[in-house]
Image (cartoon, rainbow, N blue to C red):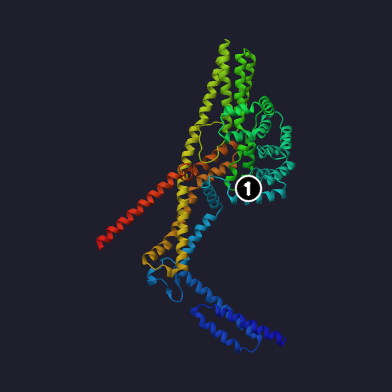
Amino acid sequence: MSIQANAAAARLARWLLGCAVRHWPAESRPWGLALAAEIDETASAREALRWSLGGLRVFTRSVLSGAWTWLKLPAGGSLPGGAEGPAGSSLLPKRSRAFTASIVGAAAILLFLPEGREATRTVRASWQGYQEPSWDVRPLKKLAARAEEERDASALGFVALNTADSERAAALTERAVAIDPTLIWVYGVRNHYASDDPRRTEWQARLQAADPGNAVPDLFAADALVEPRVHMLVEHGATEETVIRVLERDPAWVALMERAYRAPRYDSYVQKYYQLAHSVWSREQYLPPTLALCRFWFDAVPGLLNIRVYSRIKVHEAKSARAAGDMKRAQSLLEEVDAFGMRMADSGGEKIEQIIGLGAAQQAEQELVDIYSSTGNTQGARSVALRLAQIEGRVQGMQAWHDPAVPRSKGHVGDINASEVRMARFRKEATLVQVFGALAAIAGIAALAAILLLELWPRKIRKPILRRAACWTVDSAPAMLLAASGGFLVSFLPFQRAFAEYRAANDVLSGHERFIEALSGLGQIPYYMLGAYGHVTIWSFATIALTALLLFVVARGIYRTIES
């Protein structure tokens, strides 16, 4: 080795040992100083380097020993001089830092398990009304990137239906349909009301050509044609009669609606939307439950106001034909409305669709009963009256259904009582979930605040009562956090079972309805506190807090008076 290399090695050895001495723990620093002093006595650069490495090993053991000793002390305790509190070691927490860290770490592990992450995501979403938060965008981008690489058409269509960026959604839709032409219905859902999109006409033409005999593509086209005008009228408080007078003068809209009413099928693509969401969400289990809610289902449904308006126009034409003595035309118009309404009601779409369809059929059949009765067709009148009674029963059953916290679900009317029983059970279980979640959040924040206060700013806690409170919090809050986290996960198990049943469901529509029931039950408390009753809740808390403060001030004044 050359002289220059020897000199460089010796300087490196001295520099390493000097760095170690500067950071050496105070209780064993004399050893470090002695090692640094002896390095000048080495005979060669190699010996100096070996001496320096030996000193670094001693330094590492000293640091680890000091760290373990520091961890065995309570929060706020220090190695050299003990506690720094104003009253000495008597005002320190009872639990060591190692114990506190292990309890907090165990709680963190519970919450970071897949089950814990799903529970946390779901409860957090319930407090946001199951609206799309910013963190839902990242999983969608990740899914879209992988779907493009793997040419996964269903995943591309799913992301397109859940993406707010219209340009990005259009590109994803084109890509999905190019891979799988059966996803062409996504065109209609994505471009339903986009009257200013230059691709609208082309997409509607392609959808109409791909799905002949379905009323919905024509209804979508009619919606896009008049939606800006209808929206402006509704915004200015126009009545439905005003909307009727405006729309019945539009021949293009009337032609589209007439063709839709005469179509042999009604398929609003809601079932396809749910099936796609179920398939992708069940497969990609890292996706949040908000994406399985199908929040944009209304884009898969034609404009219900237009359907109701056109039904009223047709019924009015039938009345006019009857007044003119043309019973055959009146009966034909009413039967056309009745048939369309029943096709819509029996399509298995959203319940609001079924209600609108049944309402149209009900209105037409009421007029048919009058026509048959006036013409002496007793058998026809009796048959229509029987169907009318059945329709009224279905409508009443559907109107009894109500879900205030999340978007309405779909499917045929089942056992309303069974649904209400499940909803009541989910609401009770959701109360435990929300209570344990709130306790875990409060305990975690309190523990973090107390630990930081004792570790970073111990001298700022001058009052013994405040320091005792901080010490009690450090001792108690981590255990409360662990217990609340465990209770949170256990109480969330019924909802995880509901999610698992939905993922494994063969009947997507009924599975999705139970999935909605679970999320609806979970959203009851946030809905009450932040929804329509939010102002009542806020004023109640404010009143209780101010009353408690007033009682505290009065009691403190009385106590001081007695003491003086």
Q: Residue at x 58, y 21 (%)?
A: 364
State whether residue 108 is above or below residue 246: below
Number of marks present in the image shown = 1
Whether residue 14 can be seen here:
yes
Q: Residue furthest front?
A: 236
Query: Quick one: quadrant of the C terminus?
Result: bottom left
The quadrant of the image that shows the N terminus is: bottom right
| Amino acid bearing label 1 | Glu
Quarter holding residue 533: top left
Question: Residue 358 appears in which quarter of the rendering?
Answer: top right
Residue 245 or residue 158, whichever sits in front: 245
Measured as percent of width and height from the top left, residue 500 is found at: 56, 44
Left or right of 545? Residue 279 is right
Closer to us: 55 or 561: 561
Q: Is residue 346 visible?
A: no
Q: Residue furthest top?
A: 376
> Which residue does the image show at 56% across and 23% down from the upper left?
362
Secondary structure of the residue carrying tag 1 is loop
- Residue under the image location 48 percent in, 35 percent down: 420
The percent position of residue 207, horizontal first and vertical second, equals 71, 35
Q: Position of residue 552 (x, y in %)?
A: 33, 56
Location of residue 38 with respect to 170 vertically, above or below: below
Find disc 1 in the rendering and name its residue.
284
Mark 1 nearby-residue class (10 Å; few <14, some 14–19, many ≥20): few
**Residue 14 appears at what percent x and percent y?**
61, 83
Is 69 placed above or below 425 here? below
